[in-house]
Image (cartoon, rainbow, N blue to C red):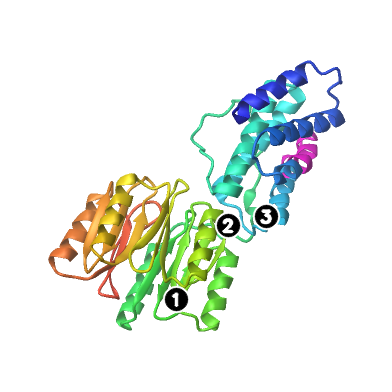
Amino acid sequence: MKIKQYFFLFFFLLQFSIQSFSQNDNIALYTAGAKFLLAKTTIDPTIIEIVERTLPSALNKDANGAITAFANVIYEKKKIKELNPEFLKYSTNKINQLVVLFPKKDYLEITMSISDLILVTDNYLNKNILPDNTTPSTNKTAKSIVDTSKINKSVDVIQIDHQSIIEQLKQINSQNKTIRCIAFTSFGGYVILYGKNGYFAKGIPKNTSAKLKELNEAKQEIKQIAFTPTGGYVILYGKNGWTSNSVNQEVNDKLTDLNKGGHTIESVSFTATDGFAIVFDKNFHFCTNIPVELVEKLDEIKNKNMEVKNISFEDDGGYVVNYGKNGVISDKISKKTLDKLSELNKNSKTIDFVSFITGGGHVIVYNNYGYSYNGTK
């Protein structure tokens, strides 16, 4: 039975309940509803406490207090220091809806809003899936808007600063230092890795910046950083060292196995829809929720004993694989990117990797420190 079917059942239990719907009874009833749901599904038990601590403020028409309580439970229980802005935006809107719906005792809308909030929260916390903010919502919205920037103080949300990236790349190029990786967050930040352990970062979560600084000061070779759509990250260092925060448990488990087995971890790539690809020992791969045809192409590269240097995914489902000296496999990417890759190939340049820029465009690195930067699709 699906989550909303359980909540429909809970709705009918509410309708036939002999209890009066006073404020205190509402808290107890809706908390009971969350527990009823959790007993029937595999939803994260932490969400019971999220409901218990969020509802009192929502029932008191305190939207700011409700969203703050909501975020604080996640910070405390999940050890997450930053929440993705899109997730906060969705949660804020949903809690504002509840603030309007509670006084009207519109129990069907209330139960459906709570079910949506629980489902989206579980998907975000445990599967790194962002809410679909394009889905039409009830027209019973609140007039007030919560300033989420005061809740998520440690996230510096910015627009892509193309000029500063180009300036950094020019400097690295002038010093003939190898550009190892360029990674973009879903909310405008970026990291450039160069040399053995050099890095430049802007607009990234503070815990990510602190980890990069720690590895740099320990003189570790920093090979790659990859961001999930929800703000988590994986950093690869040394032969098979890795560290992560707020990523799919399956990724952590596989990286642990590879580390223990002494394998060389080459790269980790995330899609916008909870998929990922891990490359190890030159051309072996472990993939989840990526196109079947891409897996088949990776198998072909492996059978030819060629090196997989990079796998990059675009937000809209496109991808590029760089392999061998300048081999390229791609699907659903822009003509500008395709044309540039073709030009580099014809000129016998060694293509190192492609990185897709948040909001559109690409960075292509070739011959260790050469680059092509295009900030538009």
Q: Is residue 63 magenta?
A: yes
Sequence-first tag of 3 and 2: 3
How far separated are the C-alphas under marks 1 and 3? Answer: 29 Å
Near-viewer residue (99 or 126) = 126
Q: Which residue is mark 2?
A: 246
Res 106 label:
none
Evaluate whether residue 372 shows in this view.
Answer: yes
Q: Which residue is mark 1?
A: 239
Q: Kindly identify the residue that appears in the image at 59 percent across and 26 percent down.
A: 138
How far separated are the C-alphas under marks 1 and 2? Answer: 23 Å
Q: Which of pointers 1 and 3 indicates the residue nearer the eye?
A: 1
Sequence-first tag of 1 and 3: 3
Left or right of 25, for residue 370: left
Amino acid type indicated by mark 2: Ser
Q: Kindly identify the residue that appears in the image at 62 percent across and 53 percent down.
A: 149
Q: Which residue is mark 3?
A: 78
Left or right of 134, for residue 182: left
Q: Secondary structure at mark 3?
A: helix
The range drawn in magenta is 51-64
